[in-house]
Image (cartoon, rainbow, N blue to C red):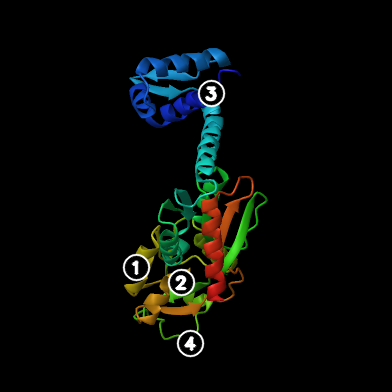
């Protein structure tokens, strides 16, 4: 496919996102007829219809979506190659794109990024906060340079993972909860309590669901909240309990706003991992970031 170049693949990806030739032309700094010309050339080269015009919008056909799958990957790799070459051999300028799950993003990364920006003020940093599975997928698709996730034992053939610290799950309740003075929390007490669950995509939710299912517990009343801060606020109201990262609630526990107990019979030990993609070149910015994380790990041991 001699005429398949990066510009044409960028057009495919942008058309799926914006559905307007005029918008795509503006984003790429092209004239509208030029975008149309490349679209027609793509269809001619592949010998199949890739685009449909519907009520002023451009929609990809099934064949177009098949091409989009590869176009997105190639575009991401091309952008990554450009960043790596631009950053090569210098930390005076460049970019660093990080993905992190909520706990490490909130309770670990601020001090790390503060130190990084002081050491390398010319580096532009972007941080995306997602669930651990979403961060892992972003690393796979070359959308980020490095990830920081809190999860159970982590192994993946194409990803390199370095354990940084433990992230223990604990049971929390308000001092005003009816069982707040219990010597210990048994499965029976948990079953009798109103439960606040994490969002369905989080690793904490998966561990919580497994624990409840293994004990045949279906809490009589429960909330499902995507925000860890919202979960803490709900628990502090007094009626609810939840399983939460100790790092996320230690400050509130120290101030007497929440009480912490071990989760009975919870075998899964969570860790915070720094993860990178072994199938890609490690740019200088990423290497410096991983090195700083390792120094932090050694300092807290």
Residue at 46%, 71% in the rendered image: 247
Query: Vertical placement of 86 versus 227: above or below?
Result: above
Q: Is residue 203 left or right of residue 223?
A: right
Q: Which residue is mark 4?
A: 183
Spatial separation of the CA atoms under disc 2 and disc 3:
48 Å
Q: Nearer the viewer, residue 192 or 245?
A: 245
Give SS at disc 3: loop
Q: Which residue is mark 2?
A: 247
Q: Nearer the viewer, residue 114 or 205?
A: 114
- Label at residue 257: none
- Label at residue 234: 1
The answer to which quarter of the image holds residue 129 is bottom left
Q: Quadrant of the N terminus?
A: top right
The answer to which quarter of the image holds residue 22 is top left
Which numbered disc, 4 or 1, marks the residue that appears first in the sequence? Answer: 4
- Residue 202, percent across and down? 49, 57
Spatial separation of the CA atoms under disc 3 and disc 1:
53 Å
Residue at 51%, 17% in the rendered image: 42
Which numbered disc, 3 or 1, marks the residue that appears first in the sequence? Answer: 3
Query: Vertical placement of 264 versus 139: above or below?
Result: below
Q: Which residue is mark 3?
A: 5
For the question of whether residue 159 can be seen, the reply is yes
- Residue 68, percent across and down? 52, 29
Q: Quadrant of the C terminus?
A: bottom right
Spatial separation of the CA atoms under disc 4 and disc 1:
23 Å
């Amino acid at each position: 496919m001699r005429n398949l170049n990066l510009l044409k693949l960028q057009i495919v990806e942008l058309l799926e996102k914006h559905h307007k030739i005029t918008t795509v032309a503006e984003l790429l700094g092209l004239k509208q007829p030029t975008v149309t010309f490349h679209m027609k050339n793509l269809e001619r080269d592949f010998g199949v219809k890739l685009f449909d015009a519907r009520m002023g919008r451009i929609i990809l056909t099934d064949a177009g979506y098949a091409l989009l799958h590869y176009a997105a990957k190639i575009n991401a790799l091309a952008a990554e190659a450009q960043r790596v070459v631009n950053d090569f051999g210098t930390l005076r300028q460049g970019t660093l794109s990080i993905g992190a799950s909520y706990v490490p993003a909130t309770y670990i990364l601020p001090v790390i990024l503060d130190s990084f920006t002081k050491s390398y003020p010319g580096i532009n940093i972007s941080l995306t906060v997602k669930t651990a599975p979403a961060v892992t997928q972003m690393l796979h698709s070359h959308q980020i340079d490095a990830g920081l996730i809190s999860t159970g034992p982590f192994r993946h053939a194409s990803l390199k993972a370095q354990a940084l610290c433990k992230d223990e799950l604990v049971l929390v309740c308000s001092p005003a909860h009816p069982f707040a003075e219990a010597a210990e929390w048994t499965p029976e007490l948990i079953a009798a309590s109103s439960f606040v669950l994490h969002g369905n995509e989080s690793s904490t939710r998966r561990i919580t669901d497994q624990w409840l299912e293994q004990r045949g517990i279906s809490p009589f009343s429960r909330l499902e909240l995507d925000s860890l801060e919202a979960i803490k606020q709900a628990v502090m109201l007094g009626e609810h309990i939840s399983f939460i990262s100790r790092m996320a609630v230690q400050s509130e526990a120290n101030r007497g706003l929440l009480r912490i107990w071990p989760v009975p019979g919870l075998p899964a030990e969570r860790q915070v991992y720094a993860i990178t993609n072994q199938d890609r070149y490690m740019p200088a910015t990423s290497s410096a970031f991983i090195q700083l994380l390792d120094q932090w790990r050694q300092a807290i041991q």
